Amino acid sequence: MKDKYGWNFDNSYVNLPPIFYKKMDANPVSDPKVVIFNKPLADSLQLDSDLLQKADGAEILSGSRFPEHAEPLAQAYAGHQFAHFNMLGDGRAVLMGEQVTEEKRMDIQLKGSGRTPFSRGGDGRAAIGPMLREYIISEAMHALQIPTTRSLAVTLTGDNIQRERVLPGAVLTRVASSHLRVGTFQYAAAFGNKDDLQALASYAIDRHYPSVKNSSNPNLSFLEEVIKRQAELVANWQLVGFIHGVMNTDNMAISGETIDYGPCAFMDEYDPSTVFSSIDREGRYAYGNQPYMAAWNLARFAESLLPILDDHEEKALELAQEAISGFSAAFEMKWLEGMRKKLGLFHDEKEDANLIKELLEIMHKHHADFTNTFLALTFHLHAENLLFNEEDFMNWHEKWQKRLSRQTNSKEEVQELMKKHNPAVIPRNHLVEEALKAAEESGKYEVMNELLQVLSQPYSHSRAIQQKYRNAPAATDQPYVTYCGT
Ligand code: AMP
Ligand code: MG
């Protein structure tokens, strides 16, 4: 049933009990125009890039008109926002359908496409800046090989929206392996019955964890697998200095993908207390807190699953607690594994964790840039990096060299390993801002396109153009602040 654009929708979500969604009609906009389009992603979804960027393609990508076989819907979910439980749901997004190819089934969601039954007081719309921001950072995360939702397009609607000032409205086409969230399970537990909850769990298992179906307690194995994937995901974030910014339970995907890029940003100087988001006044979601917050969210997930973990309440609680207690070991293991690679270590030694922690403390003390310190270690950039003049760092460096000499791998092998795990470029806040400014204020997308190009190969370490994007920002008195962009 493929149409001329290549859409081949199958909407399995509508087979869930009706409490999980509301069907949606199109929400016309004035003058839709695609301004950024991801051709490689479109190719992998077997979509027609040319047609989709033309006028009637833009109508679809703005939510003005839906393709024939789409069964668009807004998803219901709840969530703990900064520890407070709320009923939420897609207030400004529609799931247009699941694009099915021989290899995969991907949700195609339009974010910013207008009001839904879950909009509460909001206008259902999004401003161009935050949608472009999500596009840049999610695509950078993908290139960094971190599981993430992706961005297919940003489409201007031609309508202005009112925020602190009037801004151009836009719609982001988001591609995800699904939009099931911890908050979807919280919704089922709070507002559905046991059958609804089981239907949701079975759906998630079918879609993301089919291997647990054969286990003796599939729901428990499902919980354990989600915990493992989240531990791995957050370890990956820590390894590149990514700060999500709003790790509310509605922003944690069951698939293990990074989702909902709001006030997220990458850390420059290494400091575990780094926070960028204007609304995170207490630093709940600071860099160093992310693993604890993930565990907290997963505890809420486990609580939601209690009725279907075991018929006996006490036994269910015991199983849930045991599963949750596995998070920190799983996280530590993944983190250590990744850190070893960042330092060119091929095998495990007991003292490795201390060696790594010592380096991080020295970086913290001397305000060293996270990304560039690991790059300097990879490429022996002694002259370029001030840290190499510090006595405590020099002592550490000697220890590290000794540690390297205890493995049989050659210097070249060590460097190759480090190159694969230390990105040459990350989406630095000042660069992202520059690209957004050119696009928002002058409608110029060249800066953004060049940035996207550079960010698409962070581990290539070869292109001269990377040099321009590598510098940490000049020191300022003003801390960088990000906003939710609602
Ligand atoms: P977020 O901070 O993006 O995770 O969004 C939290 C909740 O607010 C979700 O239920 C969103 O759908 C909803 N929301 C955010 N912005 C808007 C908006 N402009 N109109 C309606 N709902 C919104
Ligand atoms: Mg959200």
Image (cartoon, rainbow, N blue to C red):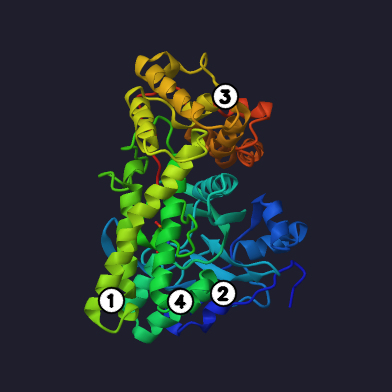
The first of marks 2 and 1 along the sequence is 2
Query: Which residue is labeled 1 in the image?
Result: 316
> Of circles 2 and 3, which is in front?
3
Residue type, label 1: Ala
The first of marks 4 and 3 along the sequence is 4
Q: Give the label on residue 162, or none.
A: none
Is 203 located above or below residue 332 in the figure?
below
- Look at the numbered disc 4 and give the secondary structure of its residue: loop
Q: Are marks 4 and 3 in contact (CB under 8 Å)?
A: no
Residue at position x 40%, y 66% from top?
Answer: 224
Q: Give the label on residue 72, or none.
A: 2
The first of marks 2 and 3 along the sequence is 2
Nearest the viewer among 241 and 480 is 241
Q: Are marks 2 and 1 in contact (CB under 8 Å)?
A: no
Relative image position of residue 176 (x, y in whole percent):
55, 62
Query: Which residue is labeled 3 in the image?
Result: 379
The answer for how far apart the CA atoms under marks 2 and 4 are is 34 Å
> Of circles 2 and 1, which is in front?
1
Residue type, label 2: Pro
> Of circles 2 and 4, which is in front?
4
Q: Residue furthest left?
A: 314
- The crowd level at tag 4 (other Cα within 10 Å; few <14, some 14-19, many 20+) is few
> Of circles 4 and 3, which is in front?
4
The answer for how far apart the CA atoms under marks 4 and 3 are is 47 Å
Residue type, label 4: Ser
Q: Give the label on residue 215, or none.
A: 4
The answer for how far apart the CA atoms under marks 2 and 3 are is 50 Å
> Of circles 1 and 4, which is in front?
4
Nearest the viewer among 161 and 21 is 21
Note whether residue 243 is visible: no
The answer for how far apart the CA atoms under marks 1 and 3 are is 52 Å
